[in-house]
Image (cartoon, rainbow, N blue to C red):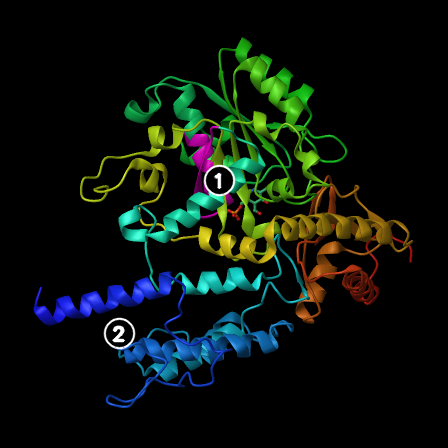
């Protein structure tokens, strides 16, 4: 290295140290109005910029634009973008086509702003369509910032403090189960967390399968009829076969029947099939139902079958003192998928797979890579425990949200979600125009407007820009699914939503055979 580069490098290390020792290099926007709108021209004095460290002019300007675009988005996100143009026309209007020649940064950022304005925000009070909604500001900030170092979570050498953050978050999630000797790994979504669990179960139950593939085994997977589609998908991907996924019936509340599960497993054992994986769901996608984990665990134990709990939706309730007992027996499961991006108001994706027995992730996913895993001990190099090679830091946003809220804040927030769902259910029960389809077990409330089509109501609300809300099947019926996961919602907003739904329904024709 040239003397100039060495000197520059040591100046940089100096300023990193200064930052680490908690003396901000740049004045924060709140503290100082002297942060310039753009990087000053060479030679001009810039007191907010550390000497010897010159951010690229381009990046500097882009980050200014980030602040502008973000504030513009926040100012308008409450209203849903209109759906008045066919998709092809919208694409043309927004100039989405990729160019042959590059454009100036300002033009690109203007386009970004227009695209954002045409994107529904899940933090809008009009958005109750998915199992996520609302925003923890610290988490969003962390999510945006993590793109700056743009690192990858395979080694401590590359990811530095991000690995320590991830370790801290995983330790807290493991303690919440509790898995005393467990391990965990972030995953790009609950579907892949479920798939990873199935890999572990398959490899543990069918020795040699990782090296030789499936040969003449006849494995069977069990999951309730209300489970998420990712279970069948994973069985298809892993060579177990979607046909070998047995749908276990549910009770009137949408919870798996453990006695039916036990019978199905015994039948399969008699016909020399190999029961391999039981998936219990903590928070089914439509009803939010929570399978009876303790009783299912007893069946799993008796037959020696891997028990996984898909807690993509309901896993977060472990942090609610009032509702954590809904997941009683969770510590008996072999693995547990948990999406913080659903109930915890953290941007997508923020999912983890937790495993009861430490060591299985590396055993079944680890690969030797001398070009990558070069320094530091195993613990600090999570790349050997992941499905992925390059991997973003998804822990930072959850860590930031947790810093802001603390255990107490999350306890209150998660408890409130379920309390609000129960409030909605009481409103629906007491309203003769509405019919509740099952008492809510977590955050989801499913109901119908008597005599009106749920599908038509949801469609009308969306087209009029009043509400994005989804519908799903509950038995033979099509229900409106109200999801209470937005931390900004309160009783008043829930009541307003019900009024908006009834008003949209009133403008629609009666369904066949219904009387008004
Ligand atoms: C019960 C359940 N499991 C898994 C998933 C999949 O999670 P992801 O969307 O993060 O892949 C969902 C998604 O809604 C879900 O409801």
Label drawn at residue 403: none
Residue drawn at the location 34% of the way across and 28% of the way down? 363
- Quote the CA–CA distance across marks 1 and 2: 36 Å
Reading the image, the residue beneath label 1 is 171
- Crowding at mark 1 (Cα within 10 Å: few <14, some 14-19, many 20+): some
Ligand 1 within 8 angstroms of badge 2 C-beta: no
Ligand 1 within 8 angstroms of badge 1 C-beta: no
187 falls in the magenta region: yes
Magenta span of residues: 181-199
Q: Marks 1 and 2: CB-CB under 8 Å? A: no
Q: Nearer the viewer, residue 48 or 420?
A: 48
Q: Quadrant of the N terminus?
A: bottom left
Q: State the image coordinates of residue 126 (x, y, percent, origin top left).
A: 68, 66
Residue drawn at the location 80% of the way across and 59% of the way down? 491
Q: State the image coordinates of residue 184 (x, y, percent, origin top left).
A: 45, 37
Asked if residue 78 can be seen in this view, the reply is yes
Q: Is residue 28 above or below residue 479?
A: below
Between discs 1 and 2, the one toward the N terminus:
2
Q: Nearer the viewer, residue 73 or 450?
A: 73
At mark 2, the secondary structure is loop
Reading the image, the residue beneath label 2 is 53
Q: Is residue 166 above or below residue 295?
A: below
At mark 1, the secondary structure is helix
């Amino acid at each position: 290295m040239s003397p100039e580069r060495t000197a520059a490098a040591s100046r940089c290390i100096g300023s990193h140290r200064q930052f680490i020792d908690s003396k901000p290099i740049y004045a924060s926007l709140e503290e100082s109005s002297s942060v310039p709108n753009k990087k000053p021209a060479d030679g001009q004095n810039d007191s907010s910029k550390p000497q010897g460290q010159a951010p690229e002019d381009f990046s500097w300007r882009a980050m200014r634009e980030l602040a502008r675009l973000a504030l513009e988005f926040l100012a308008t996100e409450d209203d849903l973008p209109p759906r008045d143009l066919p998709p092809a026309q919208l694409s043309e209007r927004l100039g989405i086509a990729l160019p042959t020649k590059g454009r100036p940064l300002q033009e690109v950022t203007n386009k970004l702003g227009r695209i954002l304005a045409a994107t529904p925000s899940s933090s809008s009070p009009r958005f109750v369509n998915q199992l996520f909604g609302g925003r923890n500001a610290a988490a969003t900030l962390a999510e945006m910032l993590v793109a700056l170092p743009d690192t990858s979570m395979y080694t401590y050498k590359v990811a530095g403090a991000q690995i320590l953050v991830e370790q801290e978050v995983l330790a807290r999630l493991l303690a919440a189960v509790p898995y005393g000797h467990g391990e965990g790994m972030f995953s790009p979504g609950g579907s892949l967390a479920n798939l990873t669990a199935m890999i572990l179960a398959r490899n543990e139950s069918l020795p040699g399968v990782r090296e030789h593939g499936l040969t003449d085994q006849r494995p069977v997977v069990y999951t309730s009829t209300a489970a998420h589609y990712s279970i069948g998908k994973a069985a298809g991907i892993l060579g177990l076969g979607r046909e070998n996924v047995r749908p276990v019936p549910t009770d009137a509340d949408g919870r798996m029947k453990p006695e039916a599960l036990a019978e199905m497993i015994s039948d399969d054992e008699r016909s020399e099939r190999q029961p391999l994986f039981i998936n219990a769901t903590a928070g089914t996608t439509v009803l939010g139902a929570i399978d009876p984990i303790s009783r299912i665990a007893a069946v799993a134990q008796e037959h020696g079958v891997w028990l996984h709990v898909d807690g993509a939706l309901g896993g977060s309730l472990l942090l609610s003192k009032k509702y954590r007992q809904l997941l009683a027996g969770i510590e008996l499961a072999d693995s547990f998928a948990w999406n913080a991006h659903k109930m915890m108001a953290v941007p997508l994706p923020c999912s983890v797979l937790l495993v009861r027995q430490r060591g299985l992730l590396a055993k079944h996913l680890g690969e030797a890579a001398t070009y990558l895993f070069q320094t530091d001990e195993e613990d600090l190099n999570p790349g050997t425990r992941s499905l992925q090679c390059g991997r973003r830091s998804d822990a930072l946003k959850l860590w930031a949200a947790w810093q802001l809220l603390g255990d107490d804040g999350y306890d209150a927030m998660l408890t409130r979600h379920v309390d609000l769902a129960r409030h909605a259910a009481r409103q629906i029960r007491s309203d003769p125009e509405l019919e509740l389809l099952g008492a809510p077990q977590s955050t989801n409330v499913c109901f119908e407007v008597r005599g009106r089509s749920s599908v038509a109501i949801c469609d009308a609300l969306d087209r009029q820009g009043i509400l994005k809300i989804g519908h799903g099947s509950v038995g033979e019926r099509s229900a409106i699914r109200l999801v209470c996961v937005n931390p900004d919602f309160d009783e008043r907003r829930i009541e307003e939503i019900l009024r908006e739904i009834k008003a949209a329904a009133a403008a629609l024709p009666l369904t066949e055979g219904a009387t008004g």
